[in-house]
Amino acid sequence: MQQNPASFSADPGRKPLRARFLLAGILLGSALLCAQAVSSASPTLGPGYPAWLAYHPVSLEAVFASAGNVPDTIVMLGNDALEDSAARELALGWRGMLDRVPRVAVSAPSNEIAGESIVVLGTQAEVRAWRPALAGEPALGADAYRLHRAGNVVLVEGGDARGVLYGAFALLREIAQQHSLPALNLRSQPWAAVRWTNEWDNPNGTIERGYAGPSIFFADGQVRADLSRAAAYARLLASIGIDGCTINNVNADAHLLLPENLKQIARIADVFRPYGVRLSLSIDSASPMVIGGLDTFDPGNPRVADWWRDKVDEIYRQIPDFGGFVVKADSEGQPGPSRYGRSPAVAANMLAQALAPHGGIVLYRAFVYNHHLDWRDPKADRARAAYDIFHPLDGDFAPNVIVQIKYGPIDFQVREPASPLFAGLPHTNEAIELQITQEYTGQQRHLVYLAPLWKTILDTGMRASITKPGTAPPLTVSDLVSGRDLQNQHHSLGGFVGVAGVGTDRWLGSPLALANLYAFGRLAWNPSLSPAAVSDEWTRLTFGNDAQVRAMVNKLELNSWHIYESYTGPLGLGTLTDILGPHFGPNPQSAEGNGWGQWLRADHQGVGMDRTVATGTGYIGQYPAPLARQYESLQTCPENLLLFLHHVPYTYRLHSGQTLIQYIYDTHYWGAQAAAAQIPAWQSLQGKVPDAIYAEVLKRLEFQAGHAIVWRDAITKWFAKMSGIPDDQHRVGNYPHRIPATDMTLDGYTPVDVTPWETASNGKAVECTGRAECSLSLTWNKPDGWYDIAVQFFDFRNGVSQFTLQVAGRAADAWSADANLPDNRMNGNTSTRHTIDNVALHRGDTVRLIGRPDGTEPAPVDYLEITPSGQQK
Ligand code: GCW
């Protein structure tokens, strides 16, 4: 159905335009990837996966009232690379959504387009020069846009060229959602000046906490030769208003600043530039020593300052629109100014001074804490660190420094209160750091739409007005990071940083996880948007406007965080994952007894850190008085943060009347059940979403449902043992349909201990070593019937073991342990469930599982669970 671009010039019905046609450009250069992607009627998951820029066909009548009104010409008033991108994007959108082939014309005089329906792209200055009466009032600020319909003109007016590009994407969003355009009149401006992603990519091509394949920027210590994905990423970022991208890990490799590497990095900046995305770098504060040949990196030493000034000048010679530096210092082993007794402000200001003449900024991370805390000290508290270190420095930072604060005081947990530091820097620029990549929230193998979590933080009321106390609602975190201060005046800077972790595997691996990248951009632009509205937009842009798809995808996304929280860490306790390992599966004990300070403080009576002022670490006292009062009292403390802020006995009764321990049991059972229910919900969309996306999401939801059971069992068993209080519904530790592998007849398999114990039946599993094949079997001694058989095994990152399940000598199923899970040991990171539904079993049948190990993966098995078909697991 796509028209041939070659036919553009041969349209006899049109007046000749004194115009430069840009359409050839659509199929050239960096847009090639995108163009290929949109040309496919149903997007696949290939390299050109278009994410939400899918441009599905829409109803022309719904959008333009009649097909005759569809503008066939896009007029660029300016001659700027960003406006060029805007025009190219509109042409792509027209092609996919409207099945039209628009002309793109530059500077068409008004008499030549009279009467014709056109889209006009221009900055406010250009619009004023072209048709003064059409320019919007009041003036548009930086990056802002206005969409306006006047007669035959659909105007996309930008405060600047970047605003034009953002306006074009906004217009496409309107069309994609089939909003009616005749009455179009929409102004929008970004909430905050800084809207960046941080990518934690390493020069060797790996990505710290990335779950979607290797880097799109680096491979084998070099910037990639082919940067088409980087260009396509910049396009995605621009479509949601992101204006900056830090391309390397905050655990930074100083060598990236070597001249030969900067030249290569400049190529990335070149492909970002047409999309208005400024490139920035994370730096190693010890660089003057590591690569500069100095014997110090003391920020108070003039030789160090000179080195940085020269380095920054060199960077700007290569990258004139360079954004600035992100700094992780004195944190988790990274060197920093404390080595020389200097404060973060001294270090930040020294860098800021080098960047200031070029307009660059420093994002200095507040994620500074001692990871060798004494866990025996009841007053020690990692959550206090950012405030304790940075609050005394308030007002000391240069105007082009922003303190970048993680949303919570610990580390991207499934739920945390807002960091008190947001309220503690009234005279300092602040940015909030959110995490798009799901480090502690299921690593894209679990569906977790994070916008509702982020909103709990952004909406937290932090500081009341000093001038008129009690008269207005307190400033929220989103107010504070926008640069509004207590007098509602703007600092010059502020913003949002999202740790994205995109890779070559269709950006985030999971198709549904892309809602998080989308939501980050949309909330950074406008934090008053609701998570539901953002999910709906994303769903319509990604999958089209089908009502059933919309309803179901929205439901899945919006319920997902609650579901994940239910079977992981309850009531603000933290995710309860393996904090010393990959942060994926359950391992609550790993949080205790070490210097990292993510302590649960669980004992036989109760659980939770006492962070009160009265008896605890005093952390609550870091909040402004009204919030501190609310948090300090058990009665008024929000229950979903209870165990973050208080140490509470297991027998404590929640507002519902339920005991704490029973709440933990019940929510975990509910959560695992809700995770399982996502599967039929998604299956209802078969044939309504592209097949490849359908299959990929289904695979992930199936894994999640199995892993939710691993979580449920591990956490509930751990708490049952810790508290000594049984589940009043007798579920915990009591699995009537389960047959532990160690209880079956083993042929070649040998029992082994599993650590942590709660991630396997009785802390044991079986492994097959020294043989090509082992098996375990049982004789079915229950009634004849239809059964679902779940095999719980361990799937390591390395090795692809093979399994075959036989019933009465015949193969019932065979599968490979080929998932790329983040561990090579038997534990909650690797425990995996494979289910075979509706198997006919007769009394006396032999059920045999055959395992064939591969390399270092010994085909390990935990248990079989054989449940009458249709019964809850
Ligand atoms: O959450 C932790 C991660 C580290 C990360 C660190 C940080 C880049 O586990 O991988 O390091 O936070 O934010 O600096």
Image (cartoon, rainbow, N blue to C red):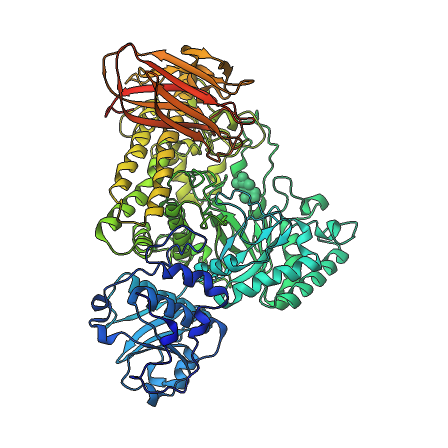
Q: In which quarter of the image is ligand 1?
A: top right
In this rendering, is residue 564 above or below 501?
above
In the picture, measured across the screen, residue 376 lies left or right of residue 471, that is right
x, y percentage for residue 423?
A: 47, 49
Q: Quadrant of the N terminus?
A: bottom left
For image coordinates 37% across by 36% down, the residue present is: 564
On the question of residue 266 being in view, the answer is: yes
x, y percentage for residue 48?
A: 44, 56
Q: Residue furthest bottom?
A: 111
In the picture, measured across the screen, residue 687 lies left or right of residue 464, that is left
Q: Nearer the viewer, residue 199 or 343?
A: 199
In this rendering, is residue 386 above or below 823?
below
x, y percentage for residue 61?
A: 20, 68
x, y percentage for residue 635?
A: 33, 32
For image coordinates 51% across by 15% down, the residue present is: 752
In the picture, measured across the screen, residue 199 lies left or right of residue 416, that is right
Q: In which quarter of the image is the C terminus?
A: top left
Query: Would you identify the image quadrant in which residue 737 lies?
Result: top left
In this rendering, is residue 372 above or below 469?
above
On the question of residue 726 being in view, the answer is: no
In this rendering, is residue 8 above or below 319?
below
Q: Nearer the viewer, residue 279 or 478?
A: 279
Query: Would you identify the image quadrant in which residue 170 lies?
Result: bottom left
Query: Would you identify the image quadrant in which residue 565 lies?
Result: top left
Q: How many numbered badges does the structure rendering display?
A: 0
Q: Which of 522 and 689 is in front in this view?
A: 689
